[in-house]
Amino acid sequence: MDKKKKTIFLVDDNVTNLNIGKDILTEKYNVVTIPSARKMFDMLLRIIPDLILLDIEMPELNGYEAIKLLKSNEATCDIPVIFLTVLGDSSSELAGLTLGAVDYISKPFSPQLLAKRIEVHMTIESQKEKLKNYNENLLGMVHEKTKTVMDLQNAILRTIAELVECRDYTTGGHIERTQNYLQILIDALGKSGLYKSEIKDWNIDFFLQSSQLHDVGKIGVKDSILNKPDKLTAEEFDEMKTHTTFGVEVIEKIQKSTVEEAFLEHAKIFAGTHHEKWDGTGYPKGLSGRDIPLQGRLMAIADVYDALISERPYKKAFSHEDAVKIIANGKGTHFDPMLVDVFMQNEREFKRVANEVK
């Protein structure tokens, strides 16, 4: 079989028609003559042709039945089928075209007409293949461009987050760890089905990237407070609290300066709500229960856990076990009860991240 030529299956129970068709087409195409639709399907297991010339009136399995089977199989559904028929009525043609045939050719064959009709359909299929390849290449370019934009957005977020972390030298690795903790929690929610309606429309990549900016408002807090080696006074703590509202303001300013601002929606929620508490005693707005956005409730657990296991100038690091107990005790007061349950089921993963990310 000449690999440079297109391959055609000629399926007809009449040997004379098979020989005539092959004589007409064999110079330009690889022609496989097949005496029945049943044997055609056996041949399809070995060869996928570029086009099928299919007789309608055949015993055992007629052309209409055969094309239904072709179109129902993913491996053969795209093969163009031209019906060969002595039937000349429009209803027969309509029936075949409705089933997916691309054309009708009447028997006995006109050599020139048969060759030309096949040439036209081969050209159409060639153009379709080129268009498909073009679209795939275009889609690849779009994906590559999208990835580039995503990488740029993430780099910007990472740079801003690292700027904050550099000022607050007591929290090294905090941003990366909290991002990992959130990944653990969101994966667990996906498996359990909890809060399914709330997270079903989230872009999880945006969600995780944006979490890096949850403390961006600390840019507006004085160094003397941010890095104070002792416990903060009430007045100093009030100023520290402003990092939540200031963080929202910073993110809103960034949003106004960019067209692609959707990826910052989670960031604004993280910044403004990660210090709210389930019982309403948190800040800055004193939200309670499910009035606190889910992003804030998730970050509350990730943020507090990391603060507990981290050493500060004014405290030693708690052990993982003690941190787990403290979060468990905060169930229904500080933290969303259902999220605490999820945390407890995955606390070993939190410990793994804490040990790996320094």
Image (cartoon, rainbow, N blue to C red):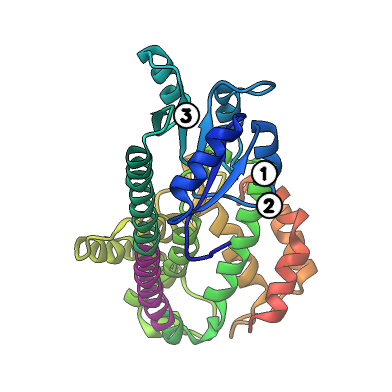
Which residue is most to the left?
257
The residue under the point 45% across, 68% down is: 234
Of label 1 and label 3, which has the lower sequence position?
3
Quadrant that contains the N terminus: bottom right
State how far apart marks 1 and 2 are (Cα).
Answer: 56 Å
Q: Position of residue 37 (x, y in %)?
A: 64, 32
- Observer-side mark, 3 or 2, equals 3
- Observer-side mark, 1 or 3, equals 3
Task: Name the residue type under label 2.
Answer: Arg
Residue situated in front as seen by the camera: 141 or 178: 141
The residue indicated by pointer 2 is 46
Q: Is residue 153 left or right of residue 187?
A: left
State how far apart marks 1 and 3 are (Cα).
Answer: 66 Å
- Observer-side mark, 1 or 2, equals 2
The residue indicated by pointer 3 is 84
Of label 1 and label 2, which has the lower sequence position?
2
The residue indicated by pointer 1 is 338
